[in-house]
Image (spheres, rainbow, N blue to C red):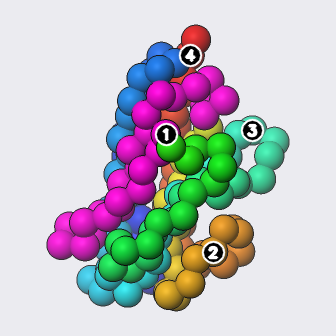
Amino acid sequence: QVQLVESGGRLVQAGDSLRLSCVASEGAFSRYAMAWFRQTPGEERHFVAHISGNGGTQYYADSVKGRFTISRDNAKNTVYLQMNTLRPDDTAVYYCASRSSLFIATTESKYQYWGQGTQVTVSL
């Protein structure tokens, strides 16, 4: 079992930046592709960004492309989401997820392990 713990979410103003972190318990962290999803009340989780196990490939949802950057530090078993130029519609609970695969996946069902989520709120 892989345990994922997110942190870094908080209340910020529109235009601010924020960095989320997700630490994994799995020792073979580099074997897992990682992703960030987000969810607002009453909606399903939506894909935000994906990064391959070695960090060489990243993929983003159109809504965050150019503003968000996903990265990872395999020595620290940690994946990050740098969020810049935040907007009120970025408000959501952000989840990190992992899957044992070399391929990009943007659907929730493709990921085996999930964190508990961290709340990001962007005010005007």
Crowding near the residue tagged with mark 3, few <14, some 14–19, many ≥20 C-alpha atoms within 10 Å: few
> Callout 2 environment at 10 Å: few (<14), some (14 to 19), or many (20+)?
some
Name the element at disc 4.
Answer: strand
Residue 58, relative to residue 8: is it above or below? below
Q: Earlier in the sequence, mark 3 or mark 1?
A: 3
Discs 2, 1 touching: Cβ within 8 Å: no
- SS label for mark 3: loop
Determine the CA span between mark 2 and mark 1: 20 Å
Question: Could you say which disc has been placed on residue 123 in the image?
Answer: 4
- Counting from the top left corner in percent of width and height, residue 43 is at 80, 46
Q: Quadrant of the N terminus?
A: bottom left
Circle 3/circle 4 CB separation < 8 Å: no
104 left or right of 31 in image: right
User: Disc 4 residue type?
Assistant: Ser
Residue 90 is one of the magenta-drawn residues: yes
Q: Residue at x 52, y 80 (%)?
A: 99
Who comes first in sequence, dot 2 or dot 1? 1
N-terminal-most mark, 4 or 1: 1
Residue identifier under label 3: 41
* Front position in the image: 81 or 26: 81
Residue type at tag 2: Ala
- Check the image and name the residue furthest to the right: 42
Q: Locate the C terminus by quadrant.
A: top right
Q: Furthest residue to the left? A: 75
Residue located beneath label 1 in the image:
67
